[in-house]
Amino acid sequence: MPKVTIDGHTIEVADGTTILQAARQIGGECVPPAMCFYTSLKGSGGKCRTCLVKVSKGSEKDPRPMPKLVASCQTMVMDGMEVASKSSEEVVNARKGVVEFLLLNHPLDCPICDQAGECHLQDLAFEHGSAGTRYEFERRTFEKIDIGPYIKLHMTRCILCYRCVYTANQITDNRVHGIIGRGDHSEISTFIEKAIDNDFSGNVIDVCPVGALTDRTFRFKSRVWFLKPMDAHRECDKCCGKTTAWMYGNEIYRITARKDKYGEVSEFICNTCRFEKKGANDWIIEGARDIEKHSVISQNHYVTEALTVI
């Protein structure tokens, strides 16, 4: 099994593990950001370039450094490899450049975006973004459209990560949307203005890292940090039935699939669970979901016990 060192942390991983996956096993600040890679989606990764890292030592057999920064989600670990992620000034500057490109056409509408508070691009912009833009041309804009009874598409916010396309390809049998156009004319759209309407179409909302695909049944109802995410489940003949219920008091505002600390869904859920079961009696509430304490969603959700002075 190969050993890799990332920002001074050494770990032994299985053959075929990528640098990004190895970094996630280590955890902490050495984990590169990833906007397009999705563990459960075949073919994902290599689109957004936010996960760039510097390989300062290729392997024990060939210790030469790689001449350019590489995408950690697509580069396999080799025995003896040494990688610099957060510790490299070159990597940090490259990520700033990537974020600047991602924000060229992105609207500054975080205050009204339903993805605010759980947006990966928002986190990246906070960490690597600049106060202003050097872009002098007119930003491209699109009209908001409904691509089904439950999904609103804001193409202006899209970063073309392809996640929703891979999701529709791999968990449904009738994909009707994809990337059309080329270059700066590329956009997500449905073919011949068809609506996305299948039992698992709502999962494209969960995999979207920005606010391009949003839940029409939840739009403008509440900010996520006002809601409490609760683990919930029900008997379902279409999917696993294991979800996260976002509640305010005893009222359920929305249902999503359960995500890990990197925002990835392990088990996709059906539209019946997501959109049609909004009553508290429809679910067995297991308890509060663990949320990272640095997340805005955890605001006022943690109770600190008083210290007893002896």
Image (cartoon, rainbow, N blue to C red):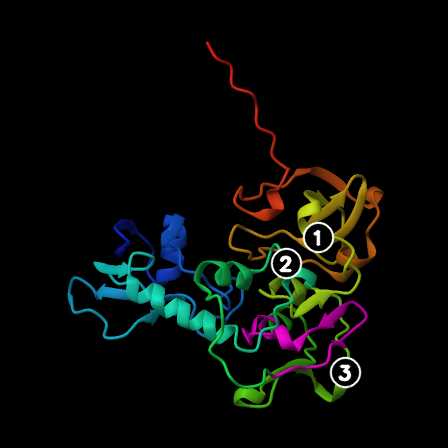
Residue beneath the point at 60% across and 64% down: 207
Q: Which residue is mark 3?
A: 194
- Give the crowd class for mark 1: few <14, some 14-19, many >=20 residues within 10 Å: some
Q: Earlier in the sequence, mark 2 or mark 3?
A: 2
| Residue under the image location 64 percent in, 37 percent down | 301
Of the pair 29 and 208, the residue shown nearer to us:
29
Residue 23's x, y, as percent?
37, 55
Q: Please check the rendered image and state whether residue 143 is part of the magenta-colored stretch, yes or no.
A: yes
Quadrant in the rendering for residue 210: bottom right
Q: Is 232 left or right of 308, judged from the image as shown?
A: right
The label on residue 116 is: 2
Question: Does label 3 or label 1 sit earlier along the sequence?
Answer: 3
Whole-number angstrom distance, CA of label 3 to CA of label 1: 30 Å
Q: Which residue is mark 1?
A: 223
- Magenta range is 140-166
Name the mark nearer the viewer: 2 or 3. Answer: 2
Left or right of 125 on screen, residue 272: right
**Residue 17 appears in the rendering:** no
User: Residue type at mark 3?
Assistant: Lys
Distance of label 2 from label 3 (alpha carbons): 28 Å
Q: Residues within 10 Å of mark 2 (few under 14, many from 20)?
A: many
Q: Is residue 292 left or right of residue 217?
A: left
Contact check, label 2 and label 1, Cβ < 8 Å: yes
Asked if the residue at tag 1 contacts the one at tag 3, i.e. Cβ–Cβ closer than 8 Å, the answer is: no
Residue situated furthest top in the rendering: 310
